[in-house]
Image (tube, helix red, strand yellow):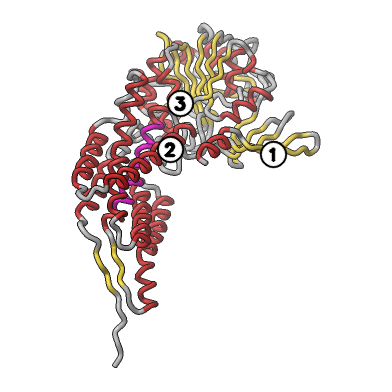
């Protein structure tokens, strides 16, 4: 059955219809519902939100050409070797080709979006022999590649979705950590440039990224915005922002001579366009030009950098947002109702006995955190792809199966050795940082990380199977375990406060509480007899 599910997931499902000469298609990729409006419009929507449009290099689209036109007009050599993370349907790839790149690695995580770009982009950039397309997670590619680049671009990297329902990670979370920027720096040639551009929703996000890039590259990054602003404040919102790091002296010098750079509005920017640093349009022609200039990022507060342990770029500070707190309260109430349901049943019957098994409750809570840990850890090491998620869940199920077979065969009665093994393995998970296995030999990376992550899962599954085998009320105990799992799911939100590494300590506390309950607690409810 699992194999059938994997086969189904591997092939995107689609429907299509035609209206007014335009073909509308709907796909289900491993990450999104994708609605596509075919030629000549070529718009892509994900989860019914506008995501990207395929734009010909002959159309007015200054953002895509800006890194290359700035380089050209500042007198620099064209970027030869280019890496584009978030290549999507090919707009950024097309502009890099137009401006002289001789080798481009284009990385995109979604197979449907990449396939649409290959088949329908008007410039056909993916058919160019200078382009190598990679269906991969961006962070995984950054860390694994042995190539070196003149330019690395994060091209509007915004997934709009969570990586998994088991964690609060977004697909791009591990691209914006200190460790990811160190990977970028390693992948650049001497004199290489790193550019991030996006529609960042808050000014403090730009401030956080600027501080991280300054720490990584040792110099202040350059920031440009559209609409043009001289200062970007923490509360600033909307607009296009481009951050330039690495070797920025060529651009800094150009702006020292000409503080404002102009691109023609409503016309495509090409290598034959007038030099934007030399333009001085009169006021009555201002609407025909788009101004760009360096912006000062105003950051009066110290922002916590995003790291592999705390990869929450879009959190202003360690906190649990209010909308999530409301969900936590609701789920806690549901878990409470699940625990109280036996009491309600006994109250209606007038008598009965309910066995509250604290062991089962806290085993459920701890196990949910182990699953979260596994998803997060493997996403960092092997990429935030649907296949990695599938392998993680398969491995957890295999651990559960092995544990049940072990208990069925050996029928262990003394569980303290397994609790001890569980606590020791959790302690190792807390002590060994998330990125410890990055960069190691592949066999050692896979073997070591899987042993570290799944050993506590195996011990926990053995303990659960052994206790469940001895259960007096298996139906009640299973319900208690599910209620505990709900509480464990809520505890996962503490990662927003402390980071994923120390989430293991919360799981360890749950398992210690489970061990402390030697027997179920009988709770009786009888109706007083009337005389």
> 202 left or right of 368?
right
Residue numbers of the magenta segment: 361-379
The residue where tag 3 is placed is 295
* Label 3 Cα neighbours within 10 Å, binned few <14 / some 14-19 / many ≥20: some
Asked if residue 414 is positioned above or below residue 346 in the image, the reply reads: above
The numbered mark, 2 or 1, whose residue comes first in the sequence reads 1
Residue 369 seen from this side: no
Callout 1: few (<14), some (14-19), or many (20+) C-alpha neighbours within 10 Å? few
**What numbered label is drawn on residue 394?**
2
Query: Which mark's residue is nearer the viewer, 1 or 3?
Result: 1
Asked whether 375 falls inside the magenta stretch, the response is yes
In this rendered view, identify the residue nearer to me: 204 or 166: 166
Q: Are marks 2 and 3 in contact (CB under 8 Å)?
A: no
Determine contact: label 1, label 3, CB under 8 Å.
no
Location of mark 1 (residue): 15
Spatial distance from mark 2 to mark 3, Cα to Cα? 49 Å
The rendered magenta stretch, by its main secondary structure, is classed as helix
Foreground residue, 508 or 245? 508
Which image quadrant for residue 39?
top right
Say whether disc 2 or disc 3 marks the residue closer to the N-terminus: 3
- Residue 418 in the image: x percent, y percent? 23, 43
Residue 24 magenta: no
């Amino acid at each position: 059955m699992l194999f059938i599910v994997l086969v189904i997931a591997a092939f995107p499902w689609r429907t299509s219809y035609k209206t007014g000469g335009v073909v509308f298609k709907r796909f289900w990729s491993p990450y999104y519902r994708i609605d596509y409006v075919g030629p000549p419009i070529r718009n892509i929507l994900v989860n019914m939100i506008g995501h990207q449009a395929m734009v010909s290099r002959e159309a007015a689209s200054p953002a895509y050409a800006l890194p290359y036109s700035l380089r050209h007009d500042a007198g620099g050599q064209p970027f030869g070797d280019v890496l584009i993370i978030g290549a999507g349907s090919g707009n950024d790839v097309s502009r890099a080709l137009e401006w002289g790149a001789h080798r481009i690695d284009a990385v995109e995580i979604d197979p449907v979006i990449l396939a649409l770009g290959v088949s329908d982009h008007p410039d056909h950039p993916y058919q160019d022999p200078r382009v190598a397309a990679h269906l991969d997670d961006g962070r995984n590619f950054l860390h694994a590649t042995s190539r070196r680049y003149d330019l690395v671009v994060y091209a509007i990297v915004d997934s709009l979705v969570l990586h998994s329902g088991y964690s609060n990670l977004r697909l791009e979370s591990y691209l914006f950590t200190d460790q990811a920027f160190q990977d970028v720096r390693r992948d650049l040639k001497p004199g290489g440039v790193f550019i991030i551009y996006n529609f960042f929703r808050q000014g403090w996000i730009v401030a956080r990224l600027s501080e991280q890039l300054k720490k990584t590259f040792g110099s202040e990054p350059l920031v440009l915005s559209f609409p043009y602003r001289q200062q970007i404040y923490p509360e600033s919102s909307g607009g296009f922002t481009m951050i330039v790091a690495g070797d920025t002296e060529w651009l800094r010098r150009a702006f020292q001579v000409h503080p404002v750079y102009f691109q023609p509005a409503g016309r495509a920017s090409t290598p034959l366009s007038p030099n934007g640093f030399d333009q001085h349009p009169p006021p009555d022609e201002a609407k025909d030009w788009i101004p760009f200039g360096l912006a000062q990022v105003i950051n009066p507060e110290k922002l916590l950098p995003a790291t592999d342990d705390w990869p929450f770029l879009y959190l202003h500070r360690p906190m649990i947002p209010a909308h999530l707190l409301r969900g936590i309260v609701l789920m806690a109430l549901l878990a409470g109702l699940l625990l109280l349901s036996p009491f309600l049943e006994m109250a209606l019957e007038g008598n009965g006995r309910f066995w509250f098994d604290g062991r089962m409750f806290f085993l459920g809570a701890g196990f949910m955190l182990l699953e979260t840990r596994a998803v997060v850890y493997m996403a960092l090491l092997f990429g935030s792809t649907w296949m990695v998620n599938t392998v993680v869940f398969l491995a957890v199920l295999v651990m559960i199966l092995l544990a049940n077979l072990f208990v069925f065969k050996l029928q262990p009665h003394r569980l303290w050795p397994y609790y001890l093994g569980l606590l020791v393995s959790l302690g190792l998970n807390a002590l060994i940082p998330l990125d410890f296995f990055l960069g190691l030999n592949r066999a050692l990376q896979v073997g070591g990380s899987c042993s570290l992550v799944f050993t506590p899962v195996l011990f926990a599954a053995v303990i659960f199977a052994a206790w469940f085998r001895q259960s007096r009320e298996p139906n009640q105990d299973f319900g208690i375990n599910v209620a505990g799992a709900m509480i464990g799911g809520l505890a996962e939100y503490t990662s927003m406060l402390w980071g994923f590494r120390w989430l293991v300590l919360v799981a360890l506390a749950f398992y210690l509480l489970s061990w402390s309950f030697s027997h179920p607690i009988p709770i009786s409810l009888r109706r007083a007899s009337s005389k």
